[in-house]
Amino acid sequence: MRNSAGSKDWLVRRLGLRRDELGRTALMFLYLLFVLLAYYILKPVSRALFLTRFDASQLPFLYLAMAASGGVLAYHYVRIAVRWSLSAAVNAATALIVVTLLAIWQLLRLDQAWLYYVFNIWVSLFSLVLVSQGWLVAGHVFDPRAAKRVYSLLAAGAVLGAAIGGSFTALVVRLVGTANLVPASAFFVLLAYSCFRLLLRQPGVSLGEARAAGEERAEFTIADVSRDVSSHRHLQVIIALLMATYVVDTLVEYQFSYMARESYRGDSLTAFLGGFYGLYLNLTTFILQVFLTSLVVSRFGVGGTLLVMPAGIGAAMAAMVVTPGIWAAGIARLIEASTRYSFNRTGMELLYMPLPADLRDRTKAFVDIFVDRVARGAGALLILGLAALGAPSLRAVSLLTLVACGVWAALAVYARRQYVDTVRRRLAARRLDLESMRIPYQDAALTRRLEELALQGEGRQSLYALRLLNEIPGFPLEALAVRLGGDAAPPVRAWLYETALQRGWRSLLKEARRELDLPAGLALMPAAAYYGVLGADGPAALRRLLDHGDPAVVEAALRAGEQLPPEAGIRLPPGRIAALASSEPAMRRLAAFAYRAEPGAAVTALPALAMDPHPAVRRAAAESLQALGAKAVPALAACLDDREAPLVRRRRAARLLGSIPAQEASDALLARLDEPDLEVLAAILRALEKQRGGAPGLQYAHEPVRRQVSRAARMYLEIRVALKCLKGAQGAAATRLLVRTLESRLDRVIQGLFTILGLRYPPHDIHAAWRAVRRGTPAEMANAAEFLDNILDHDLKRFVLPLLDEDRPPDQVGRDLFGLELLGAAAALRVMIEEGDPWLAVCAMAAAAELGFRELTPAIRAATERGGEQAARVATASLRRLGTEGLEQV
Amino acid sequence: MQDLNIVERVIALENVELLRGLSPDQLARVAAIARQEHAPPGKVLLTPEGPLEAMYVIMDGSVELLQDGVPLEVARQNEVVGSWALLDNAPLPVTARAVEDTTLLRIARDDFYELLSDNTEIVSAIFSTLVRRFRALLEQGSGS
């Protein structure tokens, strides 16, 4: 029993599965294996019978016949799938296939020419119906995240079935003859069906409501499907890729069959085809699937996976053009067929995933079957067209295949972009879009009303009316401003002076000059700026204001002076600024502004003023530091680095760095992401986030981001592992407090991780992913993970994605990524006491005492020496609770 | 009652409704500005006449609340008296008086504001709590 459980665990770990999905994965694996096994018996049998009866020139007609009949069957199949449940559709298809196989077996004895066409057509439909049903079932049994884990394995099952089918054919055909392999195939179809029935009995598996279309779409037509396809770019891309796949498949298949017929006939041809598919083709496919597909999917994503097939076939076709023969054709076929059921199948199934479930179900069977037929028909027409043009047949087909591979590769690149866009749109679908409102003030009556409101000269309404009138092209605003003059309310006057300066009006200078002699108010600053720049004696008037006793007036002059050239001399002497900096708050605030004109002294003085106890001084210093830009960075970085400084100062330094929209500031913040203090780190992250929002042109290096993502992932997992240890412990208030502390840190760490990702990737999209993660529903988590999987660099997603995988225990992820061990509650507390930050350490000490962990006495005692007064008091209380022995030594 | 350590203070502050949205780390910062006080029986903590300058969390003992000399209720261990003092200094229309030897945690409004000035995330958490409470009151009002 224990061995069985151990084997199961080993298998689960080895295959990267979850325990609860092992049963359904195994049955789905077998289901696909037997379907493919049956198919790979029928495929060499039907093709060998055809090529023995006819020559290769008949193959394009066979392909056309398959395409025509396939379209009709696809239409009827979809209508059945719409009306029936998926389960019923599988039942009906299985029964029909088994009965038909037995009938064909009997009819083959009559050796009728038409039957070889019918048999080949029927075999091609067999694979499409049963295999596409299989993948549709898989799409309902596994969610997108599980699908990403499991689909490689399922595709391996399909490949293995094909390998066994081909080998079985090669071995048995000489004993029983080609035709007698047909009932053997029927037997394997029944085995596949048995697996399907067992799959339906698995816990959590239900296809009861799964259909190829919703109930409301019961009257489903080709027009409906066409409408879906025409309105979804993502579906169009899928179809284009499938077209390319099957056109190339037909061209390669033709070349291979042509060369095979040149070399073999009868049962030998059947054995060759079976052996080729069984031994060579599927061995290659299986190796690719098991060892490479997951690697390629996780490393290069959907786009890279879809590129493998066209690139491989393109290379083989180049060889075929140079040296045509059975080996070159065989290698081309080998690459084509092996990558189709490994890389391409996996990539295409993933490409379907971001589509809404109802759309996916409605069109998947139709697209798989119908597009396959049309593309193969197009391939056949291309071969016939080349023959009609008199091109040397085989080499021309090889050249054509090479061109088709180029188009296909371009489509794969485009598909990747489309895939990411589709996932992004689905994530963003929850966003609120606020539409701006437009006011139709071209209306003359409305303009008159606005003028009346403006001329009232007071209150918000007047200001609002002026702003709207300012927007009307050609409106004589200056005349209105003169009429309002200096009688309007201060906010209106302030706006008028600002506008006058912007537009270069001189008509309000007299009012502005008068404003400079009034007590400081809202309109003083704009009036000083306006008069200073446009007034005849503007600079002189501003210089006079510098001696004013009211610091607000001096500040207004200094601010206005910033708009004049330095030689205008609107600045305070350095000695006076230094004196102001050590005076009362209003003067210190003035000094903070005045330092702007003295950058040399400002870089050392402003950081100190930015830490002033008075908020108004801090705000002024912050504004001046922002105006200094990159020059302020070294001094602020030094404040941030000062680990002896109070937390408040360091957090402010981070905030101030974040307010400077310069590359030097962001580099300084980024370089400090290894900050051990979580509070300071949170401030650094907030600063970076703010900076990113305000200055999108800044660059954020990859390496510090990668390091921080790795660090955050580790912290996250350490906390999760610690929580797992503690949740089983029988603690009281202190233990519960520690658990809550860890939980709140978990939120903070994961939020910080997304913040840091937002520096390298579109912040809006990362934020949408973060919100999806916060909501935490399985579907949204899966979508977020899927999205991140496609946009993050490989070295980032290897840390991020496992954190979002809720099915995987954190201790397992922690062990795999960082070698973390689940050590138990006492060991977890010891780590927190010895290595945690002060608050975590005191919580851990209190919890250790509560849980009676006497073995932690030495660690608690040591913590009293490291920590401050608070830590010592908690340690004393904890040791007292654990026993007097420890207390004596403290 | 001996002096409470920071962990015990945080555990006590978790009961304060106004501070309910704060994480334990944030509560630890609030706990750091709290002062432990002892009130002998009969000591008046709040009066309708005096300004409301601090909030009290009862750690041990009990405090009686009276209006116009009429007892309204008795607040006991882990309960809070004058929690809104942290946001508003308008006097409460009640008198708060220690019934027995009582140990209290006192958080002065000025200290609290000083703490908030550098901890915007605490301000944000308190706003969230207030908004939730306001919304609940509105729903209660519309329901009745």
Image (cartoon, coloured by chain):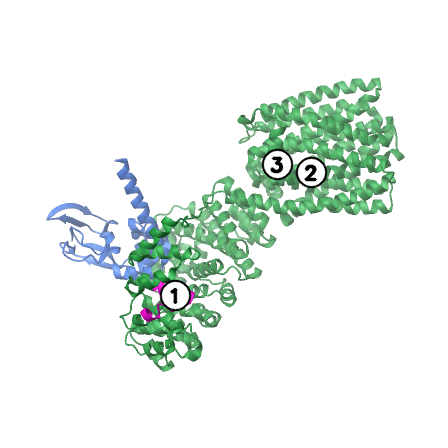
Secondary structure character of the magenta stretch overall: helix
Mark 2 Cα shell of 10 Å, populated few (<14), some (14-19), many (≥20)? many
Residue A471: image location, x then y, percent = 42, 56
Q: State which chain disc 3 sits on.
A: A
Separation of marks 2 and 1 at Cα, in angstroms: 65 Å
Separation of marks 2 and 3 at Cα, in angstroms: 16 Å
Mark 1 Cα shell of 10 Å, populated few (<14), some (14-19), many (≥20)? many
Q: Which chain is green?
A: A
The residue identified by callout 1 is A500
Does B69 sit left or right of A354 as displayed? Answer: left
The residue identified by callout 3 is A230
Q: Residue furthest left?
A: B69
The residue identified by callout 2 is A242
| Quarter of the rendering occupied by the C terminus of chain A | bottom left
* Residue at the image position 77 percent from the left and 30 percent from the top: A64
Residue B40: image location, x then y, percent = 16, 56
Residue A878: image location, x then y, percent = 35, 56
Q: Is residue A152 visible?
A: no
The correct choice, above or below, for B48 with respect to A569 in the image is above
Q: State which chain disc 2 sits on.
A: A
Number of labels in the image equals 3
Q: State which chain disc 1 sits on.
A: A
